[in-house]
């Protein structure tokens, strides 16, 4: 079982580089993966588009349709819940009467791994949230299947990466503690997969390993720990392969060779 994680595509951004070309390069690399590395599914962990606009969702939907695997998504701070829901309907994964702007979250078993996707949005801001209501939802959802190896996914990571501008957008400390308490109760969670920070970093939360994936869009954030200035680097873009091997979910961070695009 292999799930590829793409994140922070930022389709529609015009202020840096060419996010559509960068996504095409990432998709080309994913589609070239062979044998057990060929993905059973692709999970996009937010910021699919830059400004939440319908035409941007139309563009990203067309680009992602060129993947040779089914696509699942969750929202980031640059997304619009209603726009995301219209472009990527949750169908049977949520009640029919769910409002268009309700939290976009779901759980599904994908090729032997249960994926539980959370929604860390606060509409209108770049900040992340993990309020008690979401922690209760995650707790109930994880309790429904304690045996299947599980990947929990969300846009904002629950740990500071050391870049102050990014760390200021984290869910509040009390909310992160609430998430940690839930994860500690469900040892079937093999990993928490996040995006948002445009760099690869690993830590833990409630005993579960947490990994942030690099963005497919070339701008990556520099790692000048503690520096209040945010330095923008030109790549390398990348993505993550999550492979279930011997009941362990192994994460490989893969740089994108842009020459392939
Ligand atoms: Fe983000």
Image: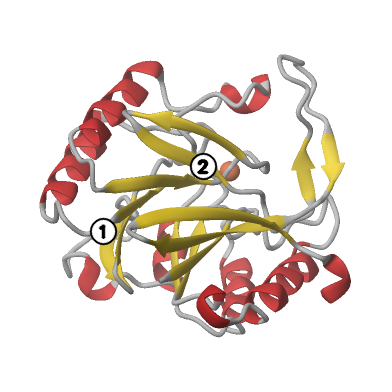
Q: Secondary structure at mark 2?
A: strand
What whole-number distance in Å separates the C-alpha atoms at marks 2 and 1? Answer: 31 Å
User: Is disc 1 placed on a helix, strand or loop?
Assistant: loop
Residue at position x 29%, y 54% in the image:
150
Q: Nearer the viewer, mark 2 or mark 1?
A: 2
Q: Earlier in the sequence, mark 2 or mark 1?
A: 1
- Left or right, 141 with reference to 170: left
> How many residues crowd mark 2 within 10 Å: few (<14), some (14–19), many (20+)?
many
On residue 211, the disc is 2
Looking at the image, residue 137 sits to the left or right of residue 176; the answer is left
User: Mark 1, residues whose alpha carbon is within 10 Å: few (<14), some, or many (≥20)?
Assistant: few
Q: What x and y, as percent, mark residue 39?
A: 50, 75
Locate residue 250 relative to residue 96 in the image: left or right.
Answer: right
What residue is pinned by disc 1?
99
Q: Judge whether residue 249 can be spotted in this image.
A: yes
Can you say which quadrant of the picture contains the C terminus? bottom right
């Amino acid at each position: 079982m292999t799930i590829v994680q793409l994140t922070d595509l930022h389709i529609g951004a015009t202020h840096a580089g060419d996010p559509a070309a960068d996504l095409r390069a990432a998709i080309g690399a994913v589609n070239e993966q062979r044998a057990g590395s060929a993905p059973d599914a692709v999970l996009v962990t937010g910021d699919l588009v830059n400004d939440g606009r319908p035409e941007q969702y139309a563009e990203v939907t067309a680009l992602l349709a060129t993947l040779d695997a089914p696509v699942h998504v969750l929202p980031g701070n640059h997304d619009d819940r209603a726009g995301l829901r219209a472009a990527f309907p949750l169908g049977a994964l949520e009640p029919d009467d769910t409002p268009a702007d309700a939290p976009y979250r779901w759980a599904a078993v994908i090729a032997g791994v249960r994926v539980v996707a959370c929604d860390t949005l606060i509409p209108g801001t770049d900040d992340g949230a993990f309020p008690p209501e979401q922690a209760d939802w995650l707790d109930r959802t994880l309790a429904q299947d304690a045996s299947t190896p599980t990947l929990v996914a969300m846009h904002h990571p629950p740990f500071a990466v050391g870049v102050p501008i990014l760390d200021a957008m984290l869910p509040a400390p009390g909310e992160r503690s609430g998430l940690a308490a839930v994860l500690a109760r469900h040892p079937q969670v093999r990993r928490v997969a996040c995006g948002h920070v445009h760099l690869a970093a690993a830590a833990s939360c409630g005993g579960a390993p947490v990994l942030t994936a690099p963005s497919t869009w070339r701008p990556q954030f520099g790692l000048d720990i503690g520096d209040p200035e945010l330095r923008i680097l030109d790549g390398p873009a990348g993505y993550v392969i999550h492979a279930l091997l011997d009941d362990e979910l192994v994460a490989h961070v893969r740089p994108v060779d842009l020459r392939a695009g």
